[in-house]
Amino acid sequence: MAGEPQGDCLFCKVVAGAIPATIVRETETTVAFRDINPQAPTHVLVIPKAHYADAAALAAGAPELAADVLRETQVIADEEKLESYRIVFNTGSGAGQTVFHAHAHVLGGRGLQWPPG
Ligand code: 5GP
Ligand code: ZN
């Protein structure tokens, strides 16, 4: 069923506490934790606790939860004192998505080039 935990999903395991992560914030519906391979001084992933494969599935299947994730990215940016930052949802393997549980990357703490690669 949409949103149900998937046994083979890395980020469902983070939500369940089965894989350790440096969690920076947790709400009833979301978890934010530091990326294991940071691409900027601040690189935090914000995920819904419920499993959706990508941002599009999340937005279509649970729009309020998608809003929770977006709201949390702002809270993280404030907590990390980021004046400028980037929110990235890689969608599809061709765009670099490697974990198929929707997640927002919050990147900041250095100059960010535009357009991205
Ligand atoms: P994607 O490439 O799907 O957009 O982003 C997945 C992100 O998850 C990558 O930036 C990768 O470094 C991060 N990641 C992969 N495995 C783990 C892990 O076990 N723990 C944490 N904290 N991050 C992970
Ligand atoms: Zn999952």
Image (cartoon, rainbow, N blue to C red):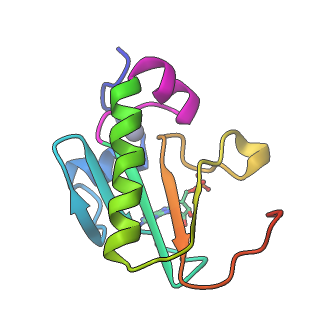
Q: Give the residue at x 83% y 63%.
A: 115
Residue drawn at x 48%, y 41% is: 102
Which residue extends farthest front?
A: 83
Q: Residue furthest left?
A: 28
Left/right placement of residue 94 relative to residue 39 reads: right
Residue at left 34%, top 28%? 64
Residue 22: x and y in percent read 29, 72
Q: Position of residue 42 (x, y in %)?
A: 48, 78
Q: Which residues are magenta?
A: 49-62
Quarter of the image for residue 67 reads top left
Task: Point out residue 14 in the picture as x, y percentages from the top left corner.
Answer: 30, 54
Taking the image as shown, residue 26 lies to the left or right of residue 111, namely left
Point out residue 36 in the picture as x, y percentages from the top left corner. Answer: 47, 73
Q: Quadrant of the N terminus?
A: top left
Of 2 and 109, nearer the camera is 109
Report if residue 6 is visible in the image: no
